[in-house]
Image (cartoon, grey):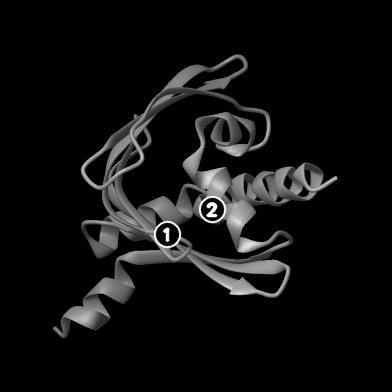
Amino acid sequence: MDSTQDLKKRTLTIEKSLKAPISLVWEAWKQPTHISQWWGPMGMETTVLEHNFNVGGTWKYSMHMPGKGDFITEGVYSEIIEFERIVTTADFKPMTEGVVLQALFEADGNNTKFTFNVIHKTEEYCKQQEEMGFYNGWGSVFNRLDEYLIASQH
């Protein structure tokens, strides 16, 4: 099987136009004080435990879901190109483990074209994650991000 085709079958993607300039969107991903305001689905509170924003750096967040406890999410940055891309491993214990996140940014006037890819180890795992609510969960996260960015500009 062609590796590009295999990668497509293991990747879930969300594309969104964020209503903020790329410099603000970048800061929202780079600075822990911003991350804690939008990371996680609606209704979750996030505490940044660790955030070493450099290649090889680790990050670790605790997401609190009322009535269900805390979930730990963590990873290691493998690529950071300012205003362009962030690539990191990610574990969202106990729900999702061993994935790679790609956050891609492209300036579009006063907005930012945002593409988010999650690459899974196997096609089966990818399908399972999609069925578990990938688009609703991450869609909620990026709606929070967009709302936070809009509010930050006023």
- Residue at 72 percent across and 43 percent down: it is 148
Quarter holding residue 110: bottom right
Name the residue furthest bottom. Answer: 2
Q: Amino acid at mark 2?
A: Trp
Q: Which quadrant: the C terminus?
A: top right
Q: Amino acid at mark 1?
A: Glu
- Residue at 47 percent across and 17 percent down: it is 70
- Label 1 and label 2: CA atoms lie apart by 8 Å
SS of the residue at dot 2?
Answer: helix
Would you place residue 106 above or below residue 116 in this image?
below
Q: Residues within 10 Å of mark 1 (few under 14, many from 20)?
A: few
SS of the residue at dot 1?
Answer: loop
For this rendering, which residue is in front, 140 or 39? Answer: 39
| Mark 1 in CB contact with mark 2 (< 8 angstroms) | yes
Would you place residue 120 above or below residue 32 in this image?
below
Left or right position of 14 against 57 = right
| Residue at mark 2 | 26
Across and down, in percent, residue 37 comes to 64, 32
- Residue at 74 percent across and 61 percent down: it is 19
Label number found at residue 82: 1
Would you place residue 16 above or below residue 147 in this image?
below
